[in-house]
Image: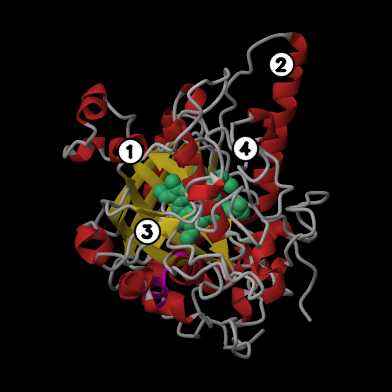
Amino acid sequence: MSTPLDINNVQGDILEGLGKKHELYYFFRIKAGQVSLFREHLGAFIPLVTTTVEAKKFHQTIKDGKKAAAEQGIPFPIIENSGVNISFSQKGLAALEITDSIGDDVFEKGMVADADGLGDDLSDWDADFKKEIHGVVIITANSLLVLEGQLERIKRIFHVGQRNATIEKVTQLSGQTRPGPEKGHEHFGFNDGLSQPAVQGVDAGVISEPGENPVRQGVILVGREGDDGVVIPGQPIQPVTRPSWALDGSFLAFRYLKQLVPEFDAFLEANALKVPRIRAPGDPTGAELLGARLVGRWKSGAPIDLTPLRDDPALAKREDFRFDTRNQERCPFAAHIRKTNPRSDLDAFGGTEIRRIIRRGIAFGPEVTPEEKRAKRSSNDQRLERGLLFTCYQSNLGNGFHFMQESWANTRTFPPTPAAVPAVPVPGIDPIIGVGNPRQMVGASPDDAAANQELNFSAKWVIPRGGEYFFSPSISALEHTFAALRRPGHSEL
Ligand code: HEM
């Protein structure tokens, strides 16, 4: 039986999220022949790693500061801050001569080899993500200056660019929150990062959804209660064996996702849903209504299941909705949030707990230019590329991200409908991230008569450009297994 969870020992991005306006992902390779020295450098780097306690403290400071500023009627000043985390790929573990199997087939395979299962077209991938990547350092900050200073400090620790460098850069990607009122919204314009599972014993008092208990710690953290093995519907659980150093780490799925924003907007316009000709103030356009039906939330974040016909920003953070398993009038079965968290749809099939992931994405790239808007096409200029640096954590990739993309988003027959309701059609694929043939969903219209009409979207608006699976070890594993000069003997959890 493992000791109680100490969140001082868990990297901060996993359970709390690193405070950020800016975020940089520095993908690196450990230099051949420099493993011992790398371990030494890593030892000097570890004190920079932000823990969950530190990340929580930072968020509390911001909350308190905002409250005090509002009370005094003064603007809230930027609080300088930076967060740092580090994670390793399977190839990184091999480079470090850590040979224990970590007990996750998807991680061990790596994302290039998994691209087919995810439905990616590798010809869209950036060449750098087809190269060997050993790890990623994630740096966040509230100002670009602080972020760049932190990056320089880290490069110095690993002697980057010098004769005795222990790492070399494979590539780096930067994201930033969108400007002004779009802050917190991804590039299609929807409020993002809203629904997250609460973790038992960590997010005190936070209820993820009524009727659904907070998830057990082992859904997100390796080796904790709930990290029982790979769950495939209709099959016995496939237990996993974990090395003892993996306790309180988490698997990170990183996806570099390009978004074709003018094309997405043009599709919504061209397929705008019928709305009454006489409209009240605040009524959506047909394009806005269609957008909300594809995502399952309005741009403000308000769930369409609670407010199906018009946006209501006051409901943006509400989580207390349960889909009606018998129909899709309020929310299509294929809507992005219903595909990726079907809530009550799985009550009769074992629930959703084991599939929950914690998301920590950030937008990247500039705003759409007036020229792109006019042309209804994204520019070919690489500097104008935009999208989402999608990051999520879970204790098992075969239960979490990989399963969600392959068996839910890309699977036309998901979510399953109750046998007692034969009239419900096959939902189709997730219109935001789904890959499959035909590229089609049903139920885009809230109008009863048109509810089962098919909506075809031959175009794709989210193009995977790369990614990798990583493992984010606990602080003690970083110290005693990753940075240790001599490897301890093998033991299992
Ligand atoms: C560019 C690509 C993507 C866009 C634009 C996007 C957008 C959104 C938006 C607007 C929401 C609703 C707000 C929220 O609860 O945060 C959402 C929720 C969610 N997305 Fe995505 N997403 C993308 C990629 C992905 C991927 C790759 C996955 C996993 C395979 C994913 C999984 C989820 C999950 C689990 C939720 C929460 C559902 C819930 O609990 O209600 N998303 N996404």
Q: Quadrant of the N terminus?
A: bottom right
Residue at 54% across, 37% down = 191
Secondary structure under tag 4 reads loop
Marks 4 and 2 in Cβ contact (< 8 Å) = no
* Pair 4/3: label in front: 3
- Mark number, residue 302: 4
Marks 4 and 3 in Cβ contact (< 8 Å) = no
The residue at label 2 has a CB less than 8 Å from ligand 1:
no
Q: Name the residue under label 1.
A: 261
Coloration mode? secondary structure
Magenta region, residue range: 84-94
Q: Name the residue under label 2.
A: 69
Label 3 sits on what residue type?
Gln
- Mark number, residue 440: 3
Q: Visible in this render: residue 424? A: yes
Marks 4 and 1 in Cβ contact (< 8 Å) = no
Query: From the viewer's perspective, is residue 296 above or below residue 145?
Result: below
Marks 3 and 2 in Cβ contact (< 8 Å) = no
Q: Which of marks 4 and 1 is nearer the N terminus?
A: 1
Mark 1–mark 3 distance (CA, rounded to whole Å): 19 Å
Q: Which of marks 1 and 2 is nearer the N terminus?
A: 2
Residue 493 in percent (x, y) is at 67, 84
Q: How crowded is mark 3: few (under 14 residues within 10 Å), some or many (20 or more)?
A: many
Q: Which of marks 4 and 2 is nearer the N terminus?
A: 2
Q: Which of marks 4 and 3 is nearer the N terminus?
A: 4
The residue at label 4 has a CB less than 8 Å from ligand 1:
no
